[in-house]
Image (cartoon, rainbow, N blue to C red):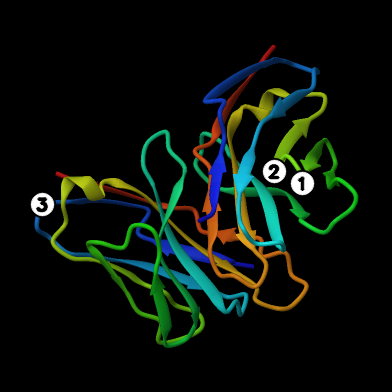
Amino acid sequence: AQKITQTQPGMFVQEKEAVTLDCTYDTSDQSYGLFWYKQPSSGEMIFLIYQGSYDEQNATEGRYSLNFQKARKSANLVISASQLGDSAMYFCAMRNTGGFKTIFGAGTRLFVKA
Amino acid sequence: NAGVTQTPKFRILKIGQSMTLQCAQDMNHNYMYWYRQDPGMGLKLIYYSVGAGITDKGEVPNGYNVSRSTTEDFPLRLELAAPSQTSVYFCASSYSRAGDTGELFFGEGSRLTVL
């Protein structure tokens, strides 16, 4: 069975500093995709970044990067130069390639301090 | 572009009432989903559909029904509402083409309270 684990219910970071949000996953499939979504206090879900299991390079999208360690089954999100607008809930998610279902972790709430 | 449109955004139901949450997408996505998000929690999959006429249960289907008569629409029916169904409901869709990442496109959510 697939599972996503986010062990940090809440994280604090100082503005302009970098922060790492942890995500570990479990799957028996060899081909899968990992995602991070942001949910601001307004409630919408915003796609941030994607990493395929066969991608050799870590994904990057602007200030977001995904630290993918396949052997450890971890897909941590790194946010560089944190901004006040980064304060939100962050969800790690996974979908097996060719599958239909995306499953989500419980989320990490990030607070950025001025 | 409208993307994924959900209605209503807010609704209060009495125990035992029924209602339908509407979801429509204009991106010609084959895959559509309904998730629920309880306070402070992640998203749980209720039902999903891989195309018109095809639906299947997710993790938490009890108390819900869906139909998919067209590619665009994927309504979620709540029968005999219970307080445990108080939640925020998200409809989402995704591409099904080879090579696509499978990123989900979400509606804005529907906040349902059952009293």
Check if mark 1 and mark 3 are on a common chain: no
Compared to residue A12, the image places residue A71 above or below, namely: below
Q: CA distance from mark 1 to mark 3?
A: 47 Å
Label 1 close to label 3 by CB (< 8 Å): no
Q: Residue B90: x and y, percent?
A: 44, 56
Q: Nearer the viewer, mark 1 or mark 3?
A: 1
Q: Label 2 belongs to which residue?
A: A73
Check if mark 1 and mark 2 are on a common chain: yes
What subunit carries mark 3? B
What subunit carries mark 1? A
Locate residue A71: give its quadrant. Answer: top right
Q: Residue at x 44, y 77 (%)?
A: B73
**How many neighbours does mark 1 have within 10 angstroms: few (below 14), some (14-19), or many (20 or more)?**
few
**How many neighbours does mark 3 have within 10 angstroms: few (below 14), some (14-19), or many (20 or more)?**
some
Q: Label 3 belongs to which residue?
A: B15
Q: Quadrant of the C terminus of chain A?
A: top right
Q: CA distance from mark 2 to mark 3?
A: 43 Å
Q: Residue B99: x and y, percent?
A: 78, 73
Q: Residue A19: x and y, percent?
A: 74, 23
Q: Residue at x 58, y 75 (%)?
A: B26
Q: Residue at x 22, y 65 (%)?
A: B19
Identity, as a three-letter code, of the amino acid under mark 1 = Lys
Q: Could you tell whether B41 is left or right of B66 in the image? A: right
Q: Residue at x 77, y 57 (%)?
A: A52
Q: CA distance from mark 1 to mark 2?
A: 5 Å
Check if mark 2 and mark 3 are on a common chain: no
